[in-house]
Every structure is written in structure tokens, then in C-alpha cells.
Image (spheres, helix red, strand yellow):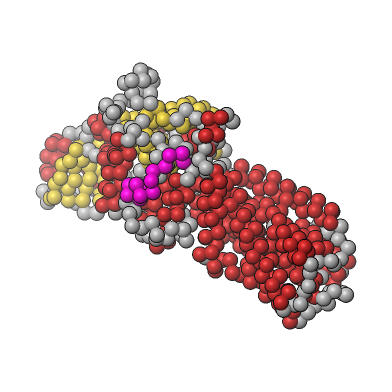
Amino acid sequence: MSTDTNTCDLATPSPPDTRPAVLARLAGVTHRYGTLTALDDLDLDVHAGEVLALLGPNGAGKTTALGLLTGLLRVQQGTVELCGGDPRDVASRRALGAMLQECRLPETLRIGELVRQFSACYLSPRPESETLALAGLEGLERRSYAALSGGQQRRVQFALAICGRPRVVLVDEPTTGLDAESRRGFWAVLRQLKLEGVAMVLTTHYLEEADALADRVVVLRGGRIVAEGTPLQLKGRVGGTRVRCVSTLHAARVEALPGVREARREGVALSLLCSDASAVVRELMALDPGLSGLEILPASLEDSVLDLIRSPAAAGASA
Amino acid sequence: MNASSAINVPNLLRMQAIETGHALLQVWRLPAFSIPTLAFPLLFYALFGLLLPVETGSDAPAHYLLATYGAFGVIGPALFGFGVGMAIDEDMGWLRLKRVSPMPMAVHFIGRVLTSMVFALAVVLALSALAAFIGGVRLWAAQWLLLWSTLTLGALPFCAMGLWIGSLVKARAAVAVVNLIYLPMSVLSGLWFPIALFPEPLQHFALLLPAFHLGDLALAIVGIGDASVLASLVVLLGYGVLFLAMALRAQRQRR
């Protein structure tokens, strides 16, 4: 049932028994707003039981990709499929649940009413109590939307996305503004949906979130995929080490040292991304005898993604 | 499309009932929005029809102004419900979420139309009560029924007009824009004061306004004026279709 380690595998179609079905697909999709190209010949498949994290800077094309998959945008060029249908058809969207960014619901409606309204649009919705339990809203069904905290309101939006037992769930920055505990609770639910075989697309600014949830990470830049793989593979691509220390040395000077890929100042601390940490640390101690608070950590997903987004190959066009 | 798709459709009537019910609940639970729309026609009618009656020619002001303030009263909820309500929902992202959901957007629009009509009927019934009990207006039962149904259905072209406005303007501007259209159009259509009090060029201009024709139909029902019922129906229908087409075009361009 569970997917084995996913690799960068868009090219070779495998026999159906070895890979779960493709539930959402963008194939050769180009999308323009006037002269701006938001998506440039993009191919993307999302499989049953898979969490795909879509990362990239603002304007990379994440929202456009979601807009096409939800049927909000008309396809200009290429193919967009949702469970084999066109997401602009109401019938296809019965397989879809979506949690959008910057969305407010009517304040006077009660939680139970909202869930009932959305459940009525699907063929075999979850029982209301199950939806409320999954979203962590038990006991709140009589509350009006306005009476909820920001985190609870976000959970209501999530409840509306999953109430219809959709096979594809799209969540656009689901945990922005949530505290750490709610975020973890939310992750647990997404993992549960994954076990039900739901295909999920997640955009997020928290790379920790992609690391914790995603089977596959796709990094977009300028409407193209600049990297794709498991979080582990992406981290391996950078293969660097993060070094932090409290020091008065200039970031620019440190960046010039051999073995340092990047250096920046964070308050009293310096944060470096190094390819050869031990050599760099020896050099730093020599340059600044007053150096303290030394930390050496494996590069995070954030390091690797930032590195990918900035890499010359990807950045070349806009430089 | 085919037999199986007919079975695999969630209950549309249930969807429609919930959508409409919720639209009404929202109005009911936020009376600050609905009460002014309801109260203004009643207030104006009480003032100009009952307390300081205006000159209406040979007809009793309470009688004459029941028809025109009835028209004024049903146009308001239609323009505000669609023009302002839609613009606000769009701004909130709530409409975007509905477009993404598997609910056909027609269900949403029909829900809004029904809400406007319920609202319109409430205004008309309240006005009628005022006219009958305080203004001493006497009509045949059939006249009352025809007046109520004509005015309630007469809200439809203005729903289309509101939909068009709501598709074009931002929420923050919507109230101002709707008021700028609603109030001058109502005055110039002779809904506040009898059109005969206006200079002749303005009387001719009124013929171009849809609100004038709804007022004219209502006047004909209460037995006043020499309205051309057919012409008024054609004009209202024409405006309705025109506004609907422009609104649908504006909606499509949003995508």
C-alpha cells in the first residue's frame, strides 16, 4: 500500500501494479499572464498515497499550478487532469478537496453548517462527526466561524477540504500562522489521509513541513522544475554542513574562505554553509580567538532548497 | 449526459436548499445589513405617502406611492444583495472556494436570487400593511396578489444588474457604487415622487430606466396611470437579459 522511495521518475511510465495511480497531472503545461510566463512546459504527476510538496520562491508558479488543478484557471497550453477528467468540470471536482490561501468564510455561519454545506456537494461524504474529529473541531459545530481563533478557522477550511472524502487534496500553505502544536496535529492528519490513499499536493514556506511530510519535493523556479526528489535526496544534493558561531568576523570575509559556500550574519552570530566544515572551523578559530557558541549541523532541506533556487544554472536567465 | 451520470450526482435540490438557507441565515444573523434596506422604503413611504403627502394629481398619495415605493423597495435588496454581497464574497475568497468546490456555480446564483426575492417580498408585504392599515388603501385581493408577485419577480432584472456591478467592482467600492446607481435611478424613475412633477425632458429620460418600467407596472396594477404594460415588460426583460449577459462576460473574464 505504501509507496516505496520515490525518485525523479517523470519520464518512465511503470506498470500499474508497481506504482499507485496518477490522480493529478500537469503535462506540458505553459501558462502566461500577459508577457509573464508563470509556468513553462511543466510536467507534474501526483500519485495515490503520495504527498508532493511544491516549493519555490514567490512567483515560481506554485499558485498557478494549483489554480489549474482546481479548475480556477483555464488551461492555455498542455493538459491538466484530475482523476482523468478536466478539473473545470464539476463532476471531476468531486474528487478534489482544496484549502486555499487567503480565504475567509462567512462569519455568521456555524461550523456544522459549513461542513454540512460542503459535504452535500460530494457523492459519499464522511459523516459530519468524522470530519470534525479529523480536523480537530469536535464540540465546536455550534460555534459561529467568527467566534473561532485563527488556527481553528484554518482547521475549518481544512475540514471543508476533506469532508467529501476526495481522492486528491490540495493544500496551499496550510499551516501559515499556526503554532507549533497545531502544525504537528495537522501533519498527523495528513499522514492519516495518505494511508487512505489520498494524493496530496502541499505548498509551504516551512521547509521543516516539507521534510516531515513529503514523499517527494518539487522545487519550482520561474515556472520550471529545478529539482525533484525525496527530501533526503535533495539534502544529499547539497551535501554541505551548516556551521553557526558567535563571532565578530565579517560575513563577506568569511565567505571568501575556501570551503565556505555561503556566509551571513544573524545578529551576533555568523551562519555558514560549508563543503568542508572541519577545515573552515580550524580557519575560523585562527582568525577569531574570541569565537564562541560553535554549532555544526547537517545541512537542512532549507539549505538545499535555497541553494537550488539560487544556483547559477537556474538563476542564469534572470541574472 | 448519460444514465450513470444522473445517478452519480449528489442531490442538487438538497444542495440548493442548503445554499439558499445559508444565504438567508447570513442575512438574518447580520441585521445591520438588512434592516436599512428594509426600513428605507417604509420610512419614505410613511413620510411622503402618509405624513406629508406629496401632490400626485388626482390620486391619493398613499395609493400612488404604494406602487412606486414597492418598486423602490424590491430593487434595493436585489442591487445590494448581488452588487455588494458578491463583491464582498469575492474579496473574502469565499467565492473562489465555492468555484473550486464541486457545487455548480448556478446553485450559488440561484440561492442569491431566491434570497433577494424573499427579501423583496418582505418589503412589499410590510409596505402593503402600512398602506392598508394606516393609508386606508383598498385593493381587490387579486390586485394585492398581482402587485406582490409582480414586484417580487420584478426584482429579477435588478438581480442581473447587481450581478454585473458586483462582478466589476471591489468590495470597498461596491456600497458607494450601488448607492450612486440605486438612489438617482429611483428618483429619476419617479419612484420617490410622481414622475408628473418632473420637467418634461426628465420624464422622457425616465422611459430609458428599467426602474421606471417596474414602477409603471405596479401603478397599472393599482389602477393608476396609462402604462403600456407590454412595453414595460419588454423593456424589463431586455434589461435583464442585457445585464445578465454583461455579468456573465465579466465573470468569465475573472478566470
Residue at the bottom extreme? Answer: B51
Report the residue at 26% width, 40% height from top.
A212
Front position in the image: B29 or B203: B29
**Residue A100: x and y, percent?**
44, 46
- The picture quadrant where one finds residue B169 is bottom right
Above or below for B52 versus A6:
below
Look at the image and tell me whether residue B110 can be seen: yes
Front position in the image: A208 or A294: A208
Q: Which residues are magenta?
A: A122-134
**Residue A153: x and y, percent?**
39, 55
Report the residue at 72% width, 66% height from top.
B70
Left or right: where does residue B92 sit relative to residue B166? left
Q: How many marks?
A: 0
- The picture quadrant where one finds residue A19 is top left
Front position in the image: A33 or A179: A179
Left or right: where does residue B31 sit relative to residue B224? left
Residue A173 covered by magenta stretch: no
Report the residue at 42% width, 47% height from top.
A160
